[in-house]
Image (cartoon, coloured by chain):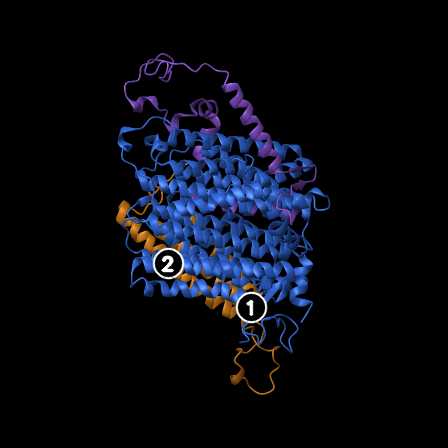
């Protein structure tokens, strides 16, 4: 049987082969556009150094944004939500059991009340 | 020789790893490499047997195995009219989960052979790994409720001892204690529900119970107990909090085996909702309940993953989010059981079980490689690893694209089924799912940038590429991910559709035990 | 009414065990709470099989003219309970071993301070 059959959802289909052909076409277009570019640059001058908004970085460690700080803007904007979430995730074993009991009692009310 | 391997294969699938587990301490007295080879050979042999059994089931239907009878298919003895022995019943969904568990166990064993540098006590580690495999296979093959409880406890005990493998770290011990307390509490409530059902109907066999169940008050209590306890074991919010602790502190080769064990508990939830209570359940209430819990799981898992500082804990929270995708697929199939998109949703949810185990497994193995090479677990002290660890970077890139649901990887194939079918039930479900998928991409791009790209840090000057055993294990997973991504139709028709049809027709399951001889 | 007393005892045992798990700070007391819940569930399983006026289900020991299986106590829940007791012993041993190792590490058994894995 044909291994390239698409998967059909109720309202469409997905065939990875068509996606790959489209992707390769897009890559070829990108390469063609790149060939129109300027090929000359001066090595070692400030044309090849990363730009840090005008700051000067002495060693390599200062150039790198650490993993914890990458999405600082996002976590700052959602500070209220994240503070509440951090307070819920206490790490205490007794709270894990309490959540289990709360969900069980909630399920009792839903299943026994409605059904 | 009249020994028909296929007709005894459900018992052999349990017996071969079990005897392997008990012989491992004996064989490890010879040499460490002999022990490693023995474990890999045992799991590979079991997987080959499972593939043969899968081919037999796809052509011949459900296979049953009765323990203690004169023929493996003699479900009812001569004078008794109910099935009284322990019966293993293997249908399309069971063998799908068995193949997932065995693939992950094989990859974990291959990875473990080169991951541990100087630890002793490795013979106990491999014994426990084989016992964990036995427990997972037993949970997925059995057709008897109390047998399921026994295998559930075997799985939890082996997982606990494996999580606490590095006993010099206090965090591993704390994670293992939390895991065993939560696990044994859930298993005790499962046992109480089994007691309720036995007291009502005098049967422990799932098919016999499904045949004679009426939805009385005590049955509803048993359903709630079973669902709550098994949902906690499967990591559904708000009872998910043990999952980042356990996944984040175990050795990464153990973590992927525990991911497969979590999916086995999810399989038990499906089996109870679709087969045991299949004919009497109020579909839409349980379906909408599952959709609500699934959306909460996705949201909590993905948003909490963004603020973690430890590498494995971030991937663990992403695993929590991925479990939510499976639950909303299954919930849509239950809530809209008469529409056409219900079967699409069920197929999407079941396919996503396979894809998620592979993707999250590959990410955990890469995290293990980083921990092996640099001895650092925190995201604050890592950077610029792509210069020295080229293959690890490529594997992480493949895992990143697969988890976030980017084409052409396998994550996209199952996620598009879930998006399209949940959209037709209620657009809000699909919108939250797509936004969370984008957040997953954000999280893993952040890890990729901060871990692998960037300049070389001075304290990580002499990291080397990881040894070959770990690279082979990661490449097996990566190749399977790419193959499933490029040919999703083939895998859907041959693996997922028999599983989905087996779940949505509980009468086949019942008639295999009670209808014939 | 008197035949309901085992089930009331089961409910009380499970409630006491749950209180010990939720409200106590010492790890050993939490483990004891789980052991109490396990005793409650085992009592529930044994009490399920009782038949009024029944005899012990040993075939070779029965007096003459007893109706099998009408006058026997059900044997299946007794097998389930034995399995469950053995599993409970193994789990209890594992939990206590972990508690010993945690004490060697943290020098305390308070569950609020053995809590490095937060959020």
How far from the left and from the top, in percent, is residue B222? 59, 56
How far from the left and from the top, in percent, is residue B362? 45, 43
Q: Is residue C49 left or right of residue B459?
A: right
Q: Quadrant of the C terminus of chain B?
A: bottom right
Query: What residue is shown with label 2?
Result: B37
Placement of C3 over or under B382, stated as above or below: below
Q: CA distance from mark 1 to mark 2?
A: 33 Å
Question: Which chain's residue wears label 1?
Answer: B
Placement of B453 over or under B31, stated as above or below: above
Q: Colour of chain A?
A: purple
Q: Nearer the viewer, residue C69 or B75?
A: B75
Q: Nearer the viewer, residue A43 or A108?
A: A43
Decide: few, some or many residues near mark 1? Use Cα within 10 Å; few <14, some 14-19, many ≥20.
many
Placement of B61 over or under B398, stated as above or below: below
How far from the left and from the top, in percent, is residue B217? 64, 55
Closer to the chain start, of discs 1 and 2, is 2
Q: Nearer the viewer, residue B298 or B190?
A: B298
Q: Colour of chain B?
A: blue
Give SS at disc 2.
helix
Residue sticking out furthest to the bottom:
C64
Q: Colour of chain C?
A: orange
Query: What residue is shown with label 1?
Result: B86
Picture residue at 28% right of the left edge, 21% below the top = A59
Residue A107's disc is none
> Share a chain, discs 1 and 2?
yes
């Amino acid at each position: 049987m044909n291994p390239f059959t698409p998967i059909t959802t109720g309202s469409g289909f997905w065939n990875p082969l068509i996606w790959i052909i489209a992707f390769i076409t897009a890559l070829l277009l990108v390469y063609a556009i790149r060939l129109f570019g300027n090929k000359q640059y001066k090595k070692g001058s400030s044309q090849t150094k990363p730009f840090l908004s005008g700051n000067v970085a002495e060693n390599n460690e200062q150039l790198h944004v650490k993993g914890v700080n990458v999405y600082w803007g996002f976590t700052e904007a959602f500070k209220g939500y994240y503070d509440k979430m951090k307070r819920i995730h206490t790490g205490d074993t007794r709270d894990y059991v309490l959540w289990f009991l709360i969900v069980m009692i909630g399920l009792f009310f839903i299943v026994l009340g409605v059904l | 020789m009249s020994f028909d391997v296929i007709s005894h294969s459900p018992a052999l699938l349990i017996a071969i790893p079990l005897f392997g587990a008990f012989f491992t301490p004996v064989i490890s007295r010879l040499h460490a490499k002999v022990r490693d080879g023995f474990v890999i050979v045992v799991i590979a042999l079991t997987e080959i047997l499972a593939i043969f059994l899968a081919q037999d089931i796809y052509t011949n239907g459900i296979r049953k195995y009765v323990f203690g009878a004169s023929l493996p298919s003699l479900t009812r003895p001569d004078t008794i009219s109910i099935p009284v022995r322990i019966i293993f019943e293997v249908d399309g969904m069971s063998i799908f989960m068995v193949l997932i568990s065995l693939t992950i166990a094989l990859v974990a064993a291959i990875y473990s052979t080169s991951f541990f540098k100087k630890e002793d006590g490795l013979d106990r580690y491999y014994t426990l790994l084989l016992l964990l495999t036995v427990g997972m296979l037993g949970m997925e093959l059995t057709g008897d409720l109390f047998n399921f409880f026994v295998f559930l406890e075997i799985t939890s005990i082996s997982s606990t001892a494996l999580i606490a493998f590095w006993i010099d770290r206090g965090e591993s011990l704390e994670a293992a204690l939390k895991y065993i307390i939560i696990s044994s509490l859930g298993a005790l409530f499962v046992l109480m529900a089994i007691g309720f059902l036995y007291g009502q109907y005098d049967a422990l066999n799932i098919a016999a119970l499904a045949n004679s169940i009426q939805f009385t008050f005590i049955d509803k209590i048993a359903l709630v107990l079973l669902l709550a306890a098994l949902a906690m074991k499967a990591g559904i919010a708000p009872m998910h909090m043990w999952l980042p602790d356990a996944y984040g502190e175990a050795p990464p080769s153990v973590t992927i085996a525990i991911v497969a064990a979590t999916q086995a508990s999810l399989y038990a939830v499906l089996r109870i909702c679709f087969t045991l209570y299949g004919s009497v359940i109020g579909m839409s209430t349980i379906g909408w309940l599952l959709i609500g819990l699934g959306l909460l799981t996705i949201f909590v898992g993905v948003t909490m993953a963004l603020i973690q500082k430890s590498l494995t804990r971030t991937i663990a929270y992403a695993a929590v989010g991925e479990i939510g995708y499976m639950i909303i697929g299954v919930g849509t199939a239950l809530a809209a059981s008469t529409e056409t998109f219900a079967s699409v949703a069920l197929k999407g949810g079941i396919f996503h079980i396979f894809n998620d185990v592979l993707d999250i497994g590959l990410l955990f193995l890469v995290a293990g490689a980083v921990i092996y090479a640099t001895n650092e677990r925190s995201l604050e002290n890592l950077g610029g690893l792509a210069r020295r660890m080229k293959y690890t970077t490529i594997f992480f890139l493949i895992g990143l694209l697969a988890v976030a649901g980017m084409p052409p990887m396998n994550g996209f194939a199952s996620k598009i089924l879930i998006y399209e079918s949940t959209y037709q039930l209620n657009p809000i479900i699909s919108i939250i799912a797509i936004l969370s998928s984008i957040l997953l991409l954000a999280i893993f791009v952040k890890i990729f940038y901060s871990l692998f790209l960037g300049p070389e840090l001075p304290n990580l000057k002499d990291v080397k590429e990881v040894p070959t055993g770990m690279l082979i294990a990661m490449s097996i997973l990566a190749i399977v991910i790419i193959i499933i991504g490029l040919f999703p139709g083939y895998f859907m028709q041959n693996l997922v559709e028999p599983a989905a049809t087996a779940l949505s027709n509980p009468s086949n399951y019942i008639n295999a035990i009670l209808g014939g001889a | 009414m008197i035949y309901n007393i085992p089930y009331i005892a089961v409910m009380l045992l499970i409630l006491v065990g749950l209180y010990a798990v939720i409200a106590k700070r010492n790890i050993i007391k939490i483990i004891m709470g789980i052991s109490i819940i396990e005793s409650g569930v085992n009592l529930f399983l044994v009490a399920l099989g009782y038949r009024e006026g029944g005899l012990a289900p040993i075939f070779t020991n029965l007096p003459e003219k007893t109706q099998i299986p009408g006058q026997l106590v059900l044997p299946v829940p007794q097998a389930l309970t034995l399995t469950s007791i053995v599993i409970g012993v193994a789990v209890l041993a594992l939990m206590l071993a972990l508690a010993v190792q945690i004490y060697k590490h943290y020098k305390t058994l308070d569950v609020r301070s053995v809590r490095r894995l937060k959020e």
